[in-house]
Image: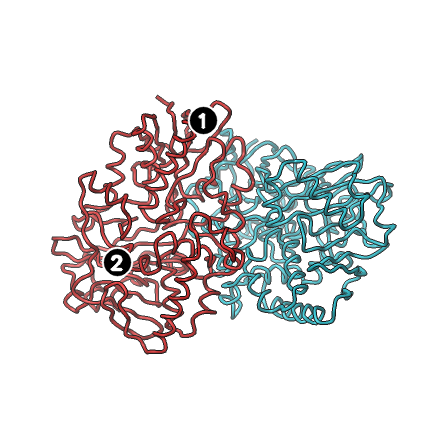
Chain colours: A red, B cyan
Amino acid sequence: MRDADVVVVGAGLAGLSAARTLLDAGRSAIVLEARDRVGGRTEGDVIDGHPVELGGTWIGEGHSEMYRLVADLGLETFPTWNDAGSLLLDLSGKRSRLAPTKGATPKLNPIALADLAQGLARYGRLARSVNPRAPWTHPKAETLDGQTYETWVRRNLRTPTGRAYFRVLAEAVYAADPADLSLLHTLFYTASNGDLETLASTDRGAQKDRVAGGSVQVAEGLATGLDVRLNTPVRRIAQDADGITVTAGDGTAFTGRHVIVAVPPTLAGRLDYDPLLPAWRDQLTQRAPAGTVVKCFASYPTPFWREEDLNGQAVSDTGPVKVTFDVSPPGAEIGVLLGFVEGGDARRWQRLPDGERRRQVLDCFTGYFGPAAATPMTYLEKDWSAEEFTRGCYGAHFAPGTWTSYGPALREPIGRIHWAGAEYAVEWSGYMEGAVRSGRHTAGEILRAANR
Amino acid sequence: MRDADVVVVGAGLAGLSAARTLLDAGRSAIVLEARDRVGGRTEGDVIDGHPVELGGTWIGEGHSEMYRLVADLGLETFPTWNDAGSLLLDLSGKRSRLAPTKGATPKLNPIALADLAQGLARYGRLARSVNPRAPWTHPKAETLDGQTYETWVRRNLRTPTGRAYFRVLAEAVYAADPADLSLLHTLFYTASNGDLETLASTDRGAQKDRVAGGSVQVAEGLATGLDVRLNTPVRRIAQDADGITVTAGDGTAFTGRHVIVAVPPTLAGRLDYDPLLPAWRDQLTQRAPAGTVVKCFASYPTPFWREEDLNGQAVSDTGPVKVTFDVSPPGAEIGVLLGFVEGGDARRWQRLPDGERRRQVLDCFTGYFGPAAATPMTYLEKDWSAEEFTRGCYGAHFAPGTWTSYGPALREPIGRIHWAGAEYAVEWSGYMEGAVRSGRHTAGEILRAANR
């Protein structure tokens, strides 16, 4: 069978959620996946016999669909490790410890603290004024989209610590440098994810919970009973008055009434389309680059940092690892540190030889958590920008000028071609939650069109 | 024969110049071209029996290789129409006329004039400090690359007229909006093309001369005697220790020792590579979008604007056509106006119905040159962003953060894969001259490697 009501390109959370929604509504769907596995930007691996998440990891405050899905699939969540100690803040040469409850105040000098507080308040007000459904309709959209986030930081924060905090925050959230980002884009993303505090937090924030056994099980559960064709990279999408034909790299053709392209924008832009996509849409995907992030894991006999009253979370402005988490498997003895190498750090670091990359990461871990971090049992890294069928994580970001020029093209179907993915989500953009909601929304768009 | 020393992808000026250089050095080259014609972003058409240039048009001050090539091919140049009258300047609601000699002073109010003069001087100093071979090595590269050109304009120009001038200039030069552009990128481009005055000028500037009969004849002349395979879109490039295999869409394979990819960066990024391109290079092409420009031509029984003491050149800050030229065929009776629709104007305008697009363009022409412009004999438009094998003109531009993060990846070969095109030129980037120089340079890179 190579015909269905809808052909879905990509078996990530968005594509699988779309197909599931269509099936539940009595329609047929075939999901074509380039890789030999489902899950897209969620992927499971094993470190010392315990599951680790190479990709998407967290479910957070307000991610209602993911929590429901996890429960429906018979899976369980557990809280991100947040107890037994403080977060380590290492900004502009000064270290401080911070109790990890949302809204806690770092022990910084009063001037830096006032600067940071004012910056956060000002940024928060701006973000609340942006409608994540249509950022380009903001009365000052052109001004906000005409500058980089970096420009805003330089203008609105006066202390090195305040600036460092805002910069590290952007790197951690977008896996991009502050210079890469349109201010309007960061405001959109913040509004889409509640507020800056939610985005940045574990406790009651976007990094609140994890899935026991690994997040990839959600994709695997969603895929159960769906018609998913693995190892089927799509090359070409043709549409006419009757329907669509989706052709794989080996020439196999699949037909349907609609197609949902549920891959990151930069990959969607590399497919062949017949007829050609309008210039407007093609130029949008030329301007939707993916971030740059590598996840680095190191395992130890115990989570020794907890003895030092540290919770394994570090936020630093000296890389290459600027953000860390304790991702030790719950109930096990071993300790696992996760370090992110992001943005410009990743671009430099990924070109180093293997040994040197590892050395730099462990140097960071040692600097944050002491000499015991220097000798892990196992060291593991995953560079998402080197993946043929992803080419960057966490997701696409927009440079200045893109939202105001091309924003309306983002979610608009082109005839029978529809778009889905974490990038297309109005709510919880960039998260697993956003991917699921976007997939369901796009499936609904097709169901509504068919009912008219 | 499907084997040569070098396989060249793209029969634009860069690819053809590269192949010609290789042939002259005794090497063999096959040029694969997706279209049914050579010339790439230069293309000829006819209006009322006279040649027009749908793409690249001008040869300017310092474009020594193009002048030599034109002479070698037995072609001739003629000066861009610049006589009989003034350029029309229409900025922030005020019109003035400007005699078209380089360095002439527009008749603006003294405050606007002082503002503009100071802005030009300041920008010029900055541009002279940037090395176009390696913009990322500038001591303030991160600061310059961390802001948009728009941010610089807002900070450094105080009058509406001064800002309008700088904005229109950027739109005309990059076919992009001031918000889209890294300041460092515009400084690189300015340095690569001499200075701002050269970039902006006809008389003694980058728009000085044209090729009699049309610029596409240069590509056609270069192609004579070369092994060019038309209608051969390339899909895949594989390399190993022995050489390269370049596979076309229909499966035909060509082999060689090296390959030169001489297509715009956004198209180079859409090919399949085996082994995969490094993350660094792939993410660069995700960040090298092409500009947005439509060329609109209207022909009239005579160049009637010359009677009104106007030279057919208009520069306005109210679109969609903000820049015009008199491109009447020399020696003929008819008059031809060329209008550019660029950047954000083009992105809105290209989605209008045919009749409305034409109406808006002719309204602009009428506003600048009088009611006679409303009824052309022939109207013709060319939207380069709608072209499958170009996807935007004049060329790629870099958003903030790209030069500093990925600059060194731009011209560096990946094993046996080399890059060429107007985007890769150190001198005269973005012009036909840059394409020719880049093609020759890249061919030289291969010849030098082979001789080692």
For badge 2, the amino acid type reads Thr
Residue B443 appears anywhere in the view: no
Give the percent coordinates (x, y) of residue A431.
33, 49
Is A51 left or right of B78, judged from the image as shown?
left
* Mark 2 and mark 1 on one chain: yes
Q: Which residue is mark 1?
A: A245
Q: CA distance from mark 2 to mark 1?
A: 44 Å
Judge the density around disc 2: few (<14), some (14-19), many (≥20) Cα neighbours within 10 Å: many
Is A108 left or right of B124, judged from the image as shown?
left
Residue A202 tag number: 2
Vertical position of residue A317 compared to residue A265: above or below:
below
Is A277 left or right of B122, judged from the image as shown?
left
In front of the other: A95 or A22:
A22
In front of the other: B307 or A283:
B307
In front of the other: B303 or A190:
A190
SS category of the residue bearing label 1: strand
Q: Which residue is rendered at x = 23% and y = 37% of the image? A: A221
Give the percent coordinates (x, y) of residue A391.
40, 47
